[in-house]
Image (cartoon, grey):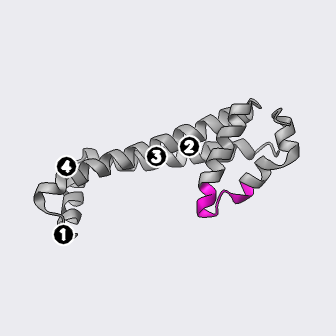
């Protein structure tokens, strides 16, 4: 496994934290909330249901980036320390990214016999 490989996961954690910060700013700022409510109104959501939609938006777009940052960080530290759990976290993250075709090369590298042997999985 290349020495730079774990740092891709560190970059993924930073990317997820940036998305989390942007979404938190939208939820926290009155103008951001007003824009979300305006989009809900334009989408035809009744006024009585808009708070529920906003709450679902706030929870979803806060929790998903936080979970993604946590998994990327876990993979980074686990791969750097050559731990089994780090390999497993990296495979999980690469598998999820492969749904967008981005993680396929990383998943291939992680599943090679030499990489599995390095983490004591064979």
Q: Crowdedness of circle 2 by 10 Å Cα count: few (<14), some, many (20+)? A: many
Residue at the (59%, 62%) spot, across then down: 100
Give the quarter of the image for residue 75.
Answer: top right
Q: Position of residue 4 (x, y in %)?
A: 75, 45
Q: CA distance from mark 1 to mark 3?
A: 27 Å
Q: Residues within 10 Å of mark 4 (few under 14, many from 20)?
A: few
Earlier residue among tags 4 and 1 = 4
What is the magenta range?
97-106
Name the image quarter holding the N terminus.
top right
List the residue tagged with mark 2: 13
Q: Nearer the viewer, mark 4 or mark 2?
A: 2
Upstream in sequence: badge 1 or badge 2: 2
The C terminus lies in quadrant: top right
Residue under circle 1?
A: 44
The reply to whether discs 1 and 2 touch (Cβ–Cβ < 8 Å) is: no
Lower sequence index among marks 3 and 2: 2
Q: Is residue 63 in the magenta section?
A: no
Q: Is the magenta region chiefly helix, strand or loop?
A: helix
Disc 4 or disc 3, which is closer to the eye? 3
Instruction: Name the residue: 79% across, 48% down.
Output: 111
Q: Earlier in the sequence, mark 1 or mark 3?
A: 1
Distance from disc 3 to disc 2, alpha carbons, whole Å, reads: 9 Å
The answer to the question of whether label 4 and label 3 lie on touching residues, with beta carbons closer than 8 A, is: no
Give me the disc on residue 59: none
Give the residue at mark 4. 30
Tell me the SS state at disc 1.
Answer: loop
Front residue (pair 30, 58):
58
């Amino acid at each position: 496994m290349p020495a730079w490989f774990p740092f891709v996961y560190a970059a993924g954690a930073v990317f997820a934290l940036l998305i989390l910060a942007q979404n938190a700013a939208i939820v926290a700022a009155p103008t951001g909330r007003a824009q979300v409510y305006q989009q809900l109104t334009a989408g035809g959501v009744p006024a009585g249901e808009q708070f529920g939609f906003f709450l679902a938006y706030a929870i979803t777009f806060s929790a998903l980036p936080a979970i993604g940052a946590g998994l990327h960080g876990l993979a980074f530290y686990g791969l750097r320390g050559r731990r089994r759990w780090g390999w497993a976290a990296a495979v999980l993250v690469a598998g999820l990214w492969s749904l967008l075709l981005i993680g396929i090369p990383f998943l291939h590298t992680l599943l090679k016999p030499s990489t599995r042997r390095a983490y004591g999985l064979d």
